[in-house]
Image (cartoon, rainbow, N blue to C red):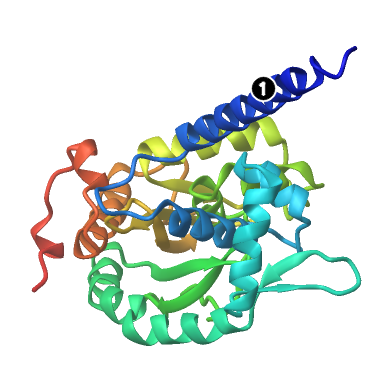
Amino acid sequence: MSDATEPAVATKHVERTEAATHRRRRRSEAREPSLPSGAVRSVVAAAAVLETLAAAEAPMRLTEIARALGAAKARIHRHLTTLRHLGLVEQERSSECYRLGRKLLHLGQAAAEQFDLRRLAEPYMARLRDLSHQTVVLSVPAQGEAMVSAVMESSNLVTISVRRGAHLPAHASAQGRIILAFAPPEAQRRALSRKLAALTPRTITAPAALRQRLAAIREELYELAPGETLLGITTLAAPLLDREEMLVGTIAIVGTDQYIPAPVDARQLGLVRACAAAISARLGSTAYQRLALPLLAEFALP
């Protein structure tokens, strides 16, 4: 090849490289949700990085984060560098993996003080307990499982007691499956790819069956778990959603299978979903409206 043709070849190579980069950028942007006017894409991308790390069960490598988000490694590395500088992300020296930073703990505590789901839900929980005559449990997402945040026990002669702070398994509880149903796809994949323990003979452990249940939860906005965590105990739960249709928690009734039967009792389901719909509406959600549920005056609280 002559010296005269080398600049032309180099120019074509640069043009092809730039075109390929432009195509990758357009594909990446196409995967991102449409944004309102004035929104900053880099902030959205940085938030997606944090959400990916939050959903992970262990620190993640740069390649894993980029693959989960379908973005270029160089782009994700820039976001990680900035987040690390701000203290929102930390990098392990030994493995070079990334995890959420300690600064997020302080932000989370401040957010919890400003938004108290338990205080908002308590009057609705009391109403559901009195109408259903069963123990009512409020749970929130925590490390891929459901953590019990508040409990209102029934006044029955024999009542079910649930410990605050207890973690309920994602695959073997109604609350856990709801949280898994609204988790990111990558978090669902990881949860269903590991060996799932059968806590009782009724625990669902087949990934295919669980995937069907997760799809049904998102469609029907409830889940029933009869004897899956403990034989003889049944839980009926519904999701609590905010204005972005993001899951913030679950509301459930818990009792013996004598009083919470399977298949689901229509009246009990109506009460649990009406309670969840009322709390979700206070959070700005309209998700339950598509179910055309009858409005229950009992949950029309001030």
Q: Is residue 191 visible?
A: no
Image point 47% across, 37% down: which residue? 29
| Image vertical order of residue 142 relative to residue 269, above or below | below
- Relative placement, left or right, of 287 versus 154 is left
Front one among 176 and 60: 60
Front one among 288 and 236: 288
| Image vertical order of residue 17 relative to residue 171, above or below | above
Tally of numbered tags: 1
Front one among 94 and 116: 94
Quarter of the C terminus within the rendering: bottom left
Of the residues shown, which amino acid type is indicated by label 1?
Arg
Image x and y of residue 98, in percent: 74, 66
Q: Is residue 289 visible?
A: yes
Image x and y of residue 143, in percent: 63, 66
Q: 10 Å neighbourhood of mark 1: few (<14), some, or many (≥20)?
A: few
- Relative placement, left or right, of 298 versus 207 is left
- Relative placement, left or right, of 84 versus 157 is right
| Image vertical order of residue 210 relative to residue 279, above or below | above
| Image vertical order of residue 135 relative to residue 10, above or below | below
In the picture, residue 167 is in which quadrant? bottom right
Q: Residue furthest front?
A: 4
Q: In this figure, which residue is indicated by the disc labeled 1?
A: 16
